[in-house]
Structures are given as C-alpha cells and as structure tokens.
Amino acid sequence: KAGVTQTPRYLIKTRGQQVTLSCSPISGHRSVSWYQQTPGQGLQFLFEYFSETQRNKGNFPGRFSGRQFSNSRSEMNVSTLELGDSALYLCASSLSGTSDVTQYFGPGTRLTVL
Amino acid sequence: GNSVTQMEGPVTLSEEAFLTINCTYTATGYPSLFWYVQYPGEGLQLLLKATKADDKGSNKGFEATYRKETTSFHLEKGSVQVSDSAVYFCALSVNTDKLIFGTGTRLQVFP
C-alpha cells in the first residue's frame, strides 16, 4: 500500500506570495492532518480534515487554510507569505472513525520564503 | 492542557550501547502514546505506539511501556547502531487525530 505523498517536495517563494501544498493520504484513510515543523517552535498542529470538513484547528493565523476533496486528498494554502513561514510542512493521514488514531506521515514539503 | 516533555539532546552513544530517551506527559483523559523517528531530510516515521496503561510498544529493537502511574513512556533499546542516529519524537493523542509532540531528542551513535 502506498504511503502518504506530498507535492512538491521543495518550494522557494518570496514574501507576500501565496503557496499551495498538496497531500495524498494512504488509500482508505479519511483523515488528513497538517503540521508545521521549525527549529524554533518544533512540530505544531495546523488543522485536520475529515470527510471534507475541518474538524480540528491549531493556533495559526487565518493566512493558513486548507481543504479536503471527496477522494480525501488535501491541500494547504498559505497566503501573504512571511519569512517566518519557512518550515517543513508535514501531512499525516489516519483511518479515523475507529479507536486507532495512529497517524502516518508523508516526507514533507520544505518551504523557503525569501 | 495536554503536553509532552522529552529529555534534551543530543544523546551521544557508542555503537552497541544501551539507549534510554525519557518522555513524560500531561493529559486529561486517556491518551494514546507514540514514538516517531525522523531521519535527516525526511518526514516522521512511526516507530512504536501504546494505547493503554501497561501496554508495551516495540519495533526494530526499540521498546517503550505506557506507565500511567508515572505518566511516562520512555524509549529504550538494548544495543544501538550507527543507523539509529536520528531525531526521536514522543507524542500523544487524546481522543482526536491531533498529535501533541515533545521537542525531539537527537541521537548520535558513533562506531
């Protein structure tokens, strides 16, 4: 079974631009979560989508948004990029709807904002 | 609130040494506990998990036991290899699909 895939793997943007990251979950997984990883703040939860609905949200500004499609694929968008948005963005999928909340991660998208 | 505390790194060991990475947690309710490993330039890989008190998770020679009385989930391995060099994250989840992570512990193993 294929793992979680994320595209693109690397991105370079400039301040003020916007960016869209994509995540395809493991087949059969209906929940997709997004995390930001930085050296200073560590791993922080952004949001979680299940059945095309945002079910959980972390403490990030409204510039960070996401959506989920009917095939469970998810996208994350960051508008008006700031230097501090440079990070590794990780997507994780889980079955959800069961007692097993184990999340499986993709390789991440490395975003650099210049 | 819910939180995870990990020992500071880096942990530096010689090959075949015994490894312990401490992890304690604070949680309301009954969390599931996880260890993830991150190799350079990669995402997180699930190493092991435990979903209730006294459960022992194990994988690739690593073990961790869910200790409710001490709110701990320490990671251990009897004999580390150079290939185990990575960053290890302890995490918890309480009734949701949101993971709360510790700060990570870098392990360096030298031949």
Image (tube, helix red, strand yellow):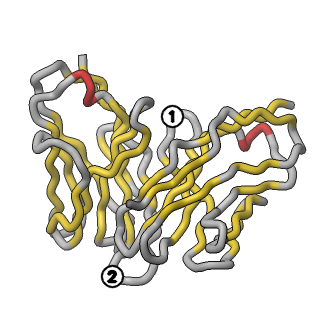
Q: Viewer-proximal residue, A101 or A59?
A: A59
* Mark number displayed over residue B41: 1
Residue flagged by tag 1: what amino acid is it? Gly
Where residue B74 appears, as percent x and y from the top left, is 69, 58
* Location of the N terminus of chain B (image quadrant): bottom left
* Mark number displayed over residue A90: none
Tell which residue pokes out farthest to the top in this image.
A114
Where residue B79 appears, as percent x and y from the top left, is 86, 50
Q: Cβ–Cβ below 8 Å for labels 2 and 1? A: no
Q: Quadrant of residue B25?
A: bottom right
* Location of the C terminus of chain B (image quadrant): top right
Residue at 44 percent across and 66 percent down: it is B93
Q: Viewer-proximal residue, A83 or A69?
A: A83
Residue ID for mark 2: A97
Q: Mark 2 vs mark 1: same chain?
A: no
Q: Chain of mark 1?
A: B
Where residue A68 appears, as percent x and y from the top left, is 17, 61
Residue at 46 percent across and 56 percent down: it is B3
Label 1 environment density (alpha carbons within 10 Å; few <14, some 14–19, many ≥20): few
Locate residue B28 relative to residue A61 in the image: left or right. Answer: right
Residue at 19 percent across and 73 percent down: it is A51
Q: CA distance from mark 2 to mark 1?
A: 32 Å
Label 2 environment density (alpha carbons within 10 Å; few <14, some 14–19, many ≥20): few
Residue flagged by tag 2: what amino acid is it? Gly
Residue at 30 percent across and 28 percent down: it is A86
Q: Chain of mark 2?
A: A
Locate residue A20 relative to residue B79 in the image: left or right. Answer: left
Q: Viewer-proximal residue, A86 or B19?
A: B19
Label 1: which secondary element: loop
